[in-house]
Image (cartoon, rainbow, N blue to C red):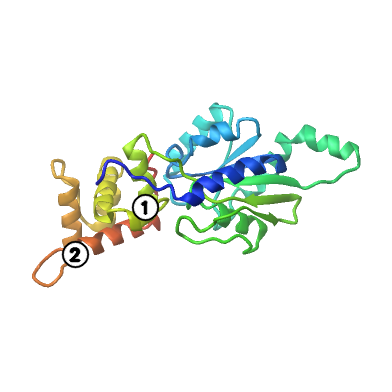
Amino acid sequence: MDDKIVWYPGHMAKAKRKIKESLFLVDIIFELLDARLPLSSKNPDFSNIFSHKPTITLMTKSDLADKNATQQWIKKLSGEGKTVIEIDCKTRRNFNKILPAAREILRDKIQKYENKGINKSIKVMVVGITNVGKSTFINSFTVTKKAKAEDRPGVTRSNQWISSGKGIDFLDTPGVLWHKFEDRQTGIKLACTGAIKDEILDTISLAIELLRLLRIKYPDLITERYKIAPVHDESAYDLFQRIAKKRGFIRSGGVIDEERCAAVLLDEFRAGKIGRVTLD
């Protein structure tokens, strides 16, 4: 696979400008991180952009992540002074913790309004990288389908206000990556989870890289899913070939259908069928 994975279309630069311009409209930031990639899914640009705004970190897709790893990451991030809540947008798990946490952080501001007899909704900007689940979170929280949500990156292209009717209003924003991934592994991990469009990638090489990561951290999950035990001294490509043969991904003439195998591996990983995995 190419050493550099770059996907920074023009709309992301525009989205970043609009986010900066809209900051004065909101009281607090909800930054969404993928629980499978708590480090790699954090846009480093956001630290500067939101440095003067209170922030709550929501770890999405926690139902797909390694439970123990998630707790370790929550402990680490909380130790850095962050308010962190892991959530599952399908079951709405821990959603009941979100509004109280926001009200606690904004307690002084809310009290000033209440002293003046003003009852204002909390204005929240929801931010994160592509395909981290911002629109899905908003739709689940508000029990609506007002935010455009699909399981692919780059769907939301502009800011959109959505009211919850529960004393909190959301500003949905487009997913924004950063211009260059300094660490090659960051780009690979993001691509594996679907944060980067498959159309610009060599998906066969990406699937092999995914196997390499899984073989290191979760070899038992590979064995359980594909009924093949990784061999210590074999390459990730050889393992990929064995899985393709085991699954019967063979074209006429006995040629392995590598594209089909890659597509299945990536789809099954993203859907959690391989198991609960944290790559960071």
Vertical position of residue 211 compared to residue 243: above or below: above
Instruction: Identify the residue position indicated by label 1 in the image.
Output: 275
- Mark 1, Cα crowd under 10 Å, few <14 / some 14-19 / many 20+, is many
Tell which residue pokes out farthest to the left in this image: 253
Residue 132 in sight from this viewpoint: no
Q: Label 1's element? A: loop
Is 197 displayed left or right of 56 in the figure? Answer: left
Is 194 displayed left or right of 215 in the figure? Answer: right
Numbered disc total: 2
Q: Quadrant of the C terminus?
A: top left
Residue 247 in sight from this viewpoint: yes
Residue 108 image point, x, y percent: 79, 32
Is 251 displayed left or right of 94 in the figure? Answer: left
Which numbered disc, 1 or 2, marks the residue that appears first in the sequence? 2
Tell which residue pokes out farthest to the bottom in this image: 252
- Mark 2, Cα crowd under 10 Å, few <14 / some 14-19 / many 20+, is some
Vertical position of residue 134 compared to residue 21: above or below: below
Residue 164 image point, x, y percent: 71, 56
Residue beneath the point at 17% across and 50% down: 237
- Marks 1 and 2, Cα distance to the nearest angstrom? 24 Å
Q: Which mark lies nearer to you, 1 or 2?
A: 2
Q: Amino acid at mark 1?
A: Gly
Q: Amino acid at mark 2?
A: Asp
Instruction: Identify the residue position indicated by label 2 in the image.
Output: 257
